[in-house]
Image (cartoon, helix red, strand yellow):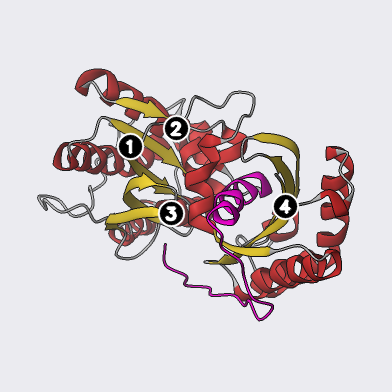
Amino acid sequence: MLVLGIETSCDETAAAVVEDGRRVLSDVVASQVLVHAEYGGVVPEVASRQHLATVVPVVSRALSEAGVEPRALDGIAVTCGPGLVGPLLVGVEMGKALAYALGRPVVGVNHLAGHLAAVFLDHPGNPAPPPYPHLALLVSGGHTLLLRVDGPGQVKSLGATRDDAAGEAFDKVAKLLGLGYPGGVVIDSLASQGDPESIDFPRPLPGRQDLDFSFSGLKTAVATRIREHGLPEPAQMPDFCASFQAAVVDVLVRKSRRALLREGLRDLLICGGVAANRGLRTALAAAAEEDGFRLFVPTPKLCTDNGAMIAQAGTWALARGERAAWDLSVDPGLPL
């Protein structure tokens, strides 16, 4: 089965061709980072216009690199939510138009289901996938979730953020520090050179035994310190970033360990853009060694938004007999 995946939920136009739900024949991503950098974050209207300009060339290149003629496709999978309305519409309409012209089925894919599927792709650097059931920590710019995954499409939410997502907190703190956009990568790099104990930032929801997250208070604590003490000097920036990152990572690790224990699971998948964070990977690897659970992390290229993960999740959906009608639309708040 050859499936074309199209992903346009935020600021990256992506398309990929995946064979039999595993083999990645092509994976093309057109990033908008430079476009949005001057604004310090994603501007939805600007993102929509960029997707309009790049979606056809990106899809064409994905088919060309895969060596696949459009009529050889067995189906088309497209992200229909959650995400930004304008960008989602560009991808969905592209997918429907192509499917209609080719006489092939189209299926709408939940962006979060795509992240959960990424580890199952046969891709250089990707680990063997975790067995079912397993726990998933999905951390990205828009979501922070703990999920019990019993099979493709069989997901139970155990905990979620009550306000900001972890990735959003990274980007907003980076903006406060004048580190540019996207800020998570810069903070991670600086944190590797700093002392995580130099500043005692608060850990969100202290003492609570649930599995929910909250990062708005931590963001406020950072803003308050900057207001009272000013921006850190360049020599102090690594310590500041390391201390902030440690506060985020500590909470993610603690809640993940608690969820594994409560659910009686021994396998943890971390996915989403923040799963590429080296501090989080290192901390979870240490926890896995201490607690005896197994850790599964997609290669960094598959942690960020891409078309291959959408094609993978779409392949599973098509195999289950799912088909979208021609009135398929988008849902910016689509639940998993």
The CA span between labels 4 and 3 is 22 Å
Residue 301, position as x, y percentages in the image: 62, 36
Instruction: State if disc 2 and disc 1 touch (CB < 8 Å).
Output: yes
Q: Which of marks 1 and 3 is nearer the N terminus?
A: 3
Mark whose residue sits in front, 2 or 3: 3
Which-is-in-front pick, marks 2 and 4?
Answer: 4
Q: How crowded is mark 1: few (under 14 residues within 10 Å), some or many (20 or more)?
A: many
Which residue is label 2 attached to? 191
Q: Which amino acid does label 3 sit on?
A: Gly
Q: Residues within 10 Å of mark 2 (few under 14, many from 20)?
A: many
What kind of element bears circle 2? helix
Distance, label 2 to label 3, CA atoms, is: 36 Å
Q: Which mark is residue 246?
A: 1
**What residue is pinned by disc 4?**
14
The residue under the point 9% across, 50% down is 207
Does label 2 or label 4 sit earlier along the sequence? 4
The alpha-carbon separation of the residues under discs 2 and 4 comes to: 30 Å
Q: Is residue 325 visible?
A: yes
- Amino acid of disc 2: Ala
Q: Going by the image, does 201 lie left or right of 336?
A: left
Q: Considering only order in the chain, which callout, 3 or 2, is on the residue closer to the N terminus?
A: 3
Residue 40: x %, y % from top left: 61, 60
Residue 86: quarter of image: bottom right
Q: Nearer the viewer, residue 188 or 267?
A: 267
In this figure, which residue is indicated by the disc labeled 3? 153
Is 86 magenta? The answer is no
Give the mark toward the camera: 1 or 3: 3
Magenta segment range?
307-336
> Neighbour class for label 4 at 10 Å: few (<14), some, many (≥20)?
many
